[in-house]
Image (cartoon, rainbow, N blue to C red):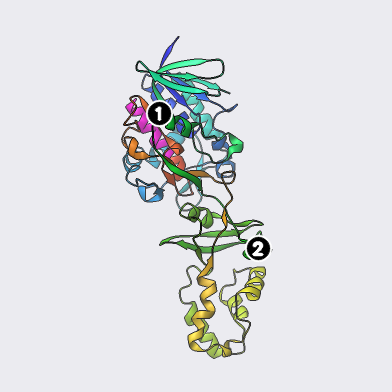
Amino acid sequence: MKVWDVIIIGAGAAGLMCAAEAALRGHRVMLLEHGREPGRKILISGGGRCNFTNREASPDNYLSDNPHFCKSALARYTPFDFLALVEAHGIAWYEKKLGQLFCRDSARQILDMLLKRCQDAGVQLLTGVSVQQVNRSEGQFCVQAASQTWRSQKLVLACGGLSIPKVGASDLGYRLLRHFGHRLVPTRPALVPLTLHPADQHLQDLRGLSLPTRVSLNGQSFVENTLFTHFGLSGPAILQISSYWQPGQALEIDFMPGKPAAENALAQARQQQPEQHLQNWLKQYHPDLPQRWLQHWKQHYLAARPLKSLRQEALSQALYPLQHWQIQPAGTAGYGKAEVTAGGADTRDFSSKTMASRHVPGLYCIGELLDVTGWLGGYNFQWAWASAYAAAEAL
């Protein structure tokens, strides 16, 4: 039986990147993928245009029980390194906002680039492989599928997390980590919409509305749009804060971000137009707020009184539900709607420089499988590229 230098399980972003980089360094690489085609999550990312990195990626944009772990890999393979690779393959790109870089044409270009690099470097890629068991004996890994067995000196786990099972996500990586005695940080859906309690179901009347907001929780804030849906809250601001949210916690939402002088403006309006109602003043002061939202907020949260009836000390209270609205989500929309999985392989069991296991010689773990979760906006792809590159350098 042929013994490979490296077997990589999982042909997603991290697995493809690691396979190409390892093969380019002279290693004989077998890349196994249980799906019918590799890189399916790449193809659906960024609305089909793949938000492949973020110019601003830094350790501050990642969550982990061990927050220092990501620093080394991110410093040694930067967004500009991957951007140079994209440009070398003639892929047109653009910056959408906040450092987010997308393909101008199609996410397929990123996948084709990764596949071509693997092919040119001599990587052997097999799809439709359902790994049944992995063991290590006499210094070699033995990977068994239904009717095939492969052996290697090194093994890289790039199996991904539990998010978006419709494109093939599974718990294989976690099972293999437990098999080899590694600890796991409890997993949870991240970058995921949040659902409502029955008492807040009236917010379904606002479904389809997207508003600029500042969403805050425990000192962490994101200024982005919040989208009201038929089941709860979504949009970039909610997806971002969801990675920090725990059951039972309440979010604070400011529907007037960037308007800190609202109280002074309202006090002035009270003097100049005392008969005006708060809703009408709000429509003039913040004309971007949709009429449907204003009507709903008037019915459920705003004082339906003329400004003259609000005493000076009551003005801030009148604005409170606009700038400090509290909502306690019922839960998340689950892994089916989550962009990534938070938690995973405890990074204290792995080298931050090489992604190598501290307990099992020759075993490596990269990408989403590790307890490193990036913000929305290309950060998780950058972690996939950086962690894969770090492992390939060390193989």
| Whole-percent x, y for residue 130 in the image | 55, 24
For the residue labelled by badge 1, is the local secondary structure a helix, a strand or a loop?
A: loop
State which quarter of the image contains the C terminus: top left
The label on residue 180 is: 1
- Circle 1: is it few (<14), some (14-19), or many (20+) Cα within 10 Å? some
Label 2–label 1 contact, CB within 8 A: no
Which residue: 61% across, 61% down? Answer: 197
Name which of mark 2 and mark 1 comes first in the sequence. Answer: 1
**Type of amino acid under label 1:** Phe
- Identify the image quadrant of residue 195: bottom right
Which residue lies under the disc numbered 2?
201
Which residue: 49% across, 43% down? Answer: 341
Q: Nearer the viewer, residue 391 or 196?
A: 196
- Does the magenta portion include 218? no
**Type of amino acid under label 2:** Gln
Q: Nearer the viewer, mark 2 or mark 1?
A: 1
Magenta highlight range: 383-395
| Whole-percent x, y for residue 209 in the image | 64, 61
**Location of residue 30 with respect to 385 vertically, above or below:** above
Secondary structure mostly seen in magenta is: helix
| Whole-percent x, y for residue 292 in the image | 67, 69
Can residue 56 be spotted in the picture? no
